[in-house]
Amino acid sequence: MRIMVFGTGGAGGFFGAQLANAGDDVVFIARGEHLEAIRKNGLHVEMPTQQIAISPAQVTDNPAEVRDVDAILLGVKAWQVRGAAETLRATIGPSTFVVPLQNGVDAASELSEILGPERVLVGLCGTLSWVIAPGRIRTVQGPNYIKFGEQNNRLSDRAQQLLAAFKKTGSSVDIPADIYSALWEKFLGITSFGGVGAVTRSPIGAMRARPETRRLLERCMEEVLALAHAKRIALSPTIVADMMGLFDTLSPDGTTSMQRDIRDGKPSELDYWNGAVVRLGEEQGIPVPTHQFIYHSLLLQEQRARAVTRSS
């Protein structure tokens, strides 16, 4: 397949490099020093047991230059999705489809409003990966998976083609029977991990080690589970215990992208993680006090970070 990775950050860079390493025709969209480093030296991914080097790598900062794309993996931040969709209009061909990799539950609907639902799959991924230097991505021990499916949950030829491409990479890949259940399962875990980690400034190893922060994680997940039930999203009744079990297997220094952005004073996906839980709780009449505390505690810093970004 010919695949564009729009946003070569931790997730996009990791999965795009795996696809390119497995022989697919991958074009990376990057910018700034990251773009120049990939142009000069290729894209390098450091993993616990191996390294991937895509050199030379196909990379540009102008998606309009790229034609005949089968699939686009969208790896930008959640708050950049609408802008990315507008940019992608010039690249979308008759059979091109977009797979969003954002955390949260809004990306597919936002893309559909701009590009049309027929161009958009629902997607999600999991990887503890981030850019450590221009042209270099590091992945720590943990589950590396990607899941996607049609918005009507029907099994399509294009989804199966992308599934076959990912199966060659060695990553865990799946087309779930219910993509929305999979999306909300990830949402339940990431908003809790990221939110508690952001307010405590702690990696998962420290959070899971203390009874007090373990209970905070559980309370966050219980609130999202109540929301899912209200929206008739099918989640396992043991999902909270199962997710805590997963947290116990992660590398102790694991953090989420939102934690790292907040730590570094950058704009984060707070509005699409804990903020989304608060918004959906208000819409459904479901109390979410733990997420409210996290969101409101971090909101002033988020607003400062965005003000600095706008003025710079």
Image (tube, grey):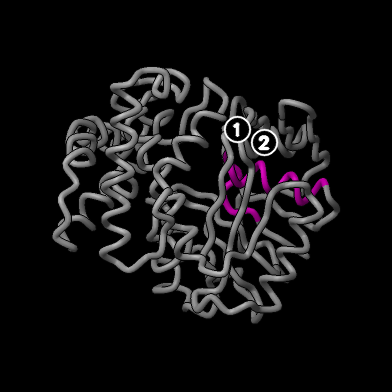
Magenta stretch in the rendered image: 5-21
Residue 233 falls in which quadrant of the image? Answer: bottom left
Magenta region includes residue 286: no
Q: Give the Cα separation between the discs numbered 1 and 2.
A: 5 Å
Left/right of residue 222 with respect to residue 289 in the rendered view: right
Q: Is residue 244 above or below residue 145?
A: above
**In the displayed structure image, the side of residue 218 where residue 181 appears, left or right:** right
Up-down: is 261 above or below 79?
above
Residue 33 location (% of width, % of height):
60, 32
Marker disc for residue 36:
2
Q: Quadrant of the C terminus?
A: top left
Choose top left, top right, bottom left or bottom right for residue 6.
Answer: bottom right
- Location of residue 176 (image quadrant): bottom right
Where is residue 186? Give x, y as percent: 46, 50
Q: From the viewer's side, name the closer residue of 233 and 13.
A: 233
Q: Amino acid under label 2?
A: Glu
Question: Mark 1 = which residue?
Answer: 33
Helix or strand or loop: what does disc 1 sit on? helix
